[in-house]
Image (cartoon, rainbow, N blue to C red):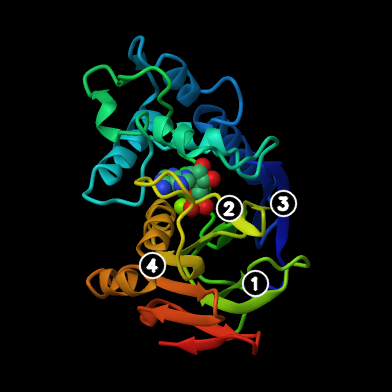
Amino acid sequence: MVNSNYEYSQTLLGTTVSLTIHEANEAVAQAVFTTIKILEDKLTVNRPMSEVMSINSAAGKHPVVVSWPVFNLIKQALQISLQPNSYFNCAIGPLVKLWKIGFKGQQVPTDEQIKQHLLLTNPRDIELNRKNHSIFLKRKGMEIDLGAIAKGYIADVIKLVLLKHNIHQAIINLGGNVLTIGDSPLSDDKCWHIGLQKPFSKNQELIGIIKINNSSVVTSGIYERFFYQKNHLYHHILNPQTGYPLDNELDSVTIISKSSLEGDIYSTILYGLGVSKACEYLQNHKSLAAIFLLKNKTIVLANTDNFCFQLLDKQYQIKL
Ligand code: AMP
Ligand code: MG
């Protein structure tokens, strides 16, 4: 029985990234952080330069050849964006930049501005060329935004890096995205214990503990980035049809899945569907489990075969 953990952390992806393993291994930690840096440099849209920004800067002008990981991730993001009535749209960038939610200058745009920017968010205007891995945004002003899935993708790559280094028990936390590998060496139940954050809590209070092994836990919550104007809360998960923040009964959706990319995609999509349609969807997709936190302090659990949940906050009530 291993009785200690080693935690390594760095500020990356706009958050604190931490890796926990049960033997000291500085080389593995550095390999993990270097991989994250390389992928962040390719995928970010929060800096002037990245591969995704080079596609965005060439919108309406010319295709841009990108590396295989970037092409492949955008290809997957596009497929999901093109599904009928999808709440996920990787071409949402112009609206994200217009609202600037969570960034300096955040503002409620005018209806007219939203209408104009919506015209630049049609995923059908993204052209992929599989032969040379180039991507072309057909209209000037279009912008790809992978903010809803980049961390999920990166977490899955980190898992491969760890396995390559023969690490078979680990937990990686990318802030909102947690990926566990294997069993936990420290707890009697062999599960990793992941705290589920209380929405809008100022001191990181937890609603409960999620117990899993070898799985990813991803949360999309409206408390992650938001601002108030005239007593109205505006948050960062936008409705691709209207251009406004999605408005429903949910504070957050947490997805438990094998792949973190899948978890990240579905945390956003199921947030958009709302709890009742999302639960219908999950009935036919048993590989995904979910925890819905409703604004009325109800917790809805779906597909509970894949995890255990221990409630800590008695203000909340669980509904299965
Ligand atoms: P997440 O917390 O994973 O749900 O991702 C939220 C982030 O994804 C936002 O900060 C935006 O960058 C981006 N985003 C917002 N709305 C959407 C949407 N409907 N589809 C895809 N990406 C979105
Ligand atoms: Mg997401």
Foreground disc of the pair 3, 1: 1
Q: Which residue is mark 4?
A: 274
Q: Is mark 4 within 8 Å of ligand 1?
A: no
Residue that appears at 44% across and 80% down? 300
Residue 198 badge: 1
Let me know if residue 176 appears in the view: yes
Q: Is residue 42 left or right of residue 305?
A: right
Q: Which residue is mark 2?
A: 234
In percent of width and height, residue 230 lies at 67, 54
Query: How many residues crowd mark 2 within 10 Å: few (<14), some (14–19), many (20+)?
Result: many
In terms of secondary structure, where does tag 2 sit?
A: strand
Q: Is residue 13 left or right of residue 239?
A: right
Query: Which badge, 4 or 3, is on the more N-terminal residue?
Result: 3
Query: Which badge, 4 or 1, is on the more N-terminal residue?
Result: 1
Rounded to the nearest angstrom, the CA distance separating label 2 from label 3 is 34 Å
Residue type at mark 1?
Lys
In terms of secondary structure, where does tag 3 sit?
A: strand
Foreground disc of the pair 2, 4: 2
In percent of width and height, residue 66 lies at 39, 21
User: Is 188 rendered above or below residue 61?
Assistant: below
Q: Is residue 275 left or right of residue 283?
A: right
Q: Which residue is mark 3?
A: 8
Query: Which badge, 2 or 3, is on the more N-terminal residue?
Result: 3
